[in-house]
Image: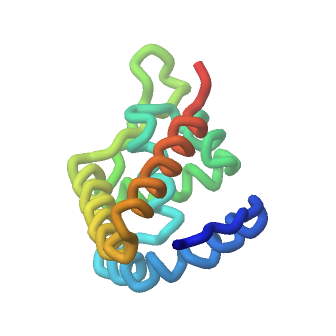
Amino acid sequence: MTTTRTVNRHEASLAISQLMPSILRGVQLDFFINRKITQTQLLVLMAIHGHGRCCMGTLAENLHVRMPTATGIVGRLVRSGFVHRFPCAEDRRQVLVELTPKGREFIYAFQSVIRRRWEEVLRLLNPQELAAFHHAIQRLHTQMQPRS
């Protein structure tokens, strides 16, 4: 008979924070190096992907960076062909950004690499553990969604 001990939030968060880098180690570095993109640029691409077309001010606010910082990162992504930047038709003072087809392909490729890595890791769990893990992840995902 297997016994489970109670784990507090501190222990769980510490275990997760130590586990995540080892799960993703190597996958990310090769992926970014081969595509000549930084992890910061990935975060910006993911934010734009999550919002769809959005204005630079909203992007900077959601990334918790100042507008000049967001402008610099987006500028590099524009030059690399991942992002399209253009003035808003209704208010030309506003600048909008959206992913290009190359940017969307990059996001989908990254998600595919991460999914395959997680599939490798999840093979270590038995069916009951996998079901419990899936339930916990789904619950966290639901709880972390913005409230409307």
Q: Can you give x and y, in whole percent of width and height, for residue 71 in the image?
A: 55, 50
Q: Nearer the viewer, residue 67 or 146?
A: 146
Q: Nearer the viewer, residue 142 or 85?
A: 142
Q: Going 58% across and 51% down the picture, which residue do you hit?
A: 70
Considering only vertical position in the picture, is 25 above or below 62? below
Q: Describe the colour scheme in one phrase.
A: rainbow
Relative to 33, is 12 on the left or the right?
right
Q: Nearer the viewer, residue 43 or 92?
A: 43
Q: Can you give x and y, in whole percent of width and height, for residue 134 in the image?
A: 43, 52
Relative to 102, is 139 on the left or the right?
right
| Quadrant of image for the C terminus | top right
Q: Can you give x and y, in whole percent of width and height, for residue 147 in the image?
A: 61, 24
Q: Going 32% across and 59% down the picture, which residue do you hit?
A: 111
Considering only vertical position in the picture, is 49 above or below 111? above
Q: Going 26% across and 55% down the picture, which residue do you hit?
A: 108
Relative to 144, is 78 on the left or the right?
left
